[in-house]
Image (cartoon, grey):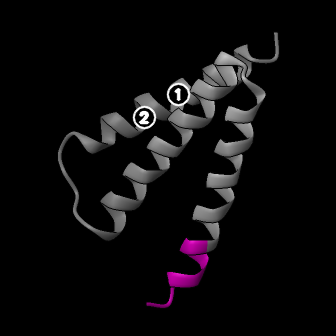
Amino acid sequence: KALRVPVIAYLGVISAMTVCGWATGRGWVIAGTTLFVISDTLLGWRQFVRERSWMAVAVMVTYHGAIVSLALSLW
């Protein structure tokens, strides 16, 4: 319960980031912001709902995919 407000605020921030990313129309930005949201969703689910054995790998794959995509968007 103590984390409800911070978690909701963070969800608002990353959702806004994704909307802005999609609004650019640039493929790498769209991929990066989407993968970042997926990564953080998996992290939150693992932390607050239920952990699954595959989640650690999925978090790393989506997080690194997001970072690479966002870096490539700068070219």
Per the image, label 2 sits on a secondary structure element best described as helix
Q: Which residue is mark 2?
A: 60
Q: Is residue 23 above or below residue 46?
A: above
Residue 58: percent from the left, percent from the top? 33, 35
Which amino acid does the dot numbered 2 rest on? Met
Q: Is residue 20 above or below residue 4?
A: above
Which amino acid does the dot numbered 1 rest on? His
Q: 19 or 50, which lies in front? A: 19
What is the quadrant of residue 23 in the picture? top right
User: Around disc 2, counting alpha carbons within 10 Å, would you say few (fewer than 14), some (14 to 19), or many (20 or more)?
Assistant: few
Q: Which residue is mark 1?
A: 64
Residue 46 image label: none
| Contact flag, marks 1 and 2 (Cβ < 8 Å) | yes
Q: CA–CA distance between discs 1 and 2?
A: 6 Å
In the image, the segment drawn in magenta is: 1-8
- Indicate the quadrant containing the N terminus: top left, top right, bottom left or bottom right: bottom left
Q: Main secondary structure of the magenta part?
A: helix
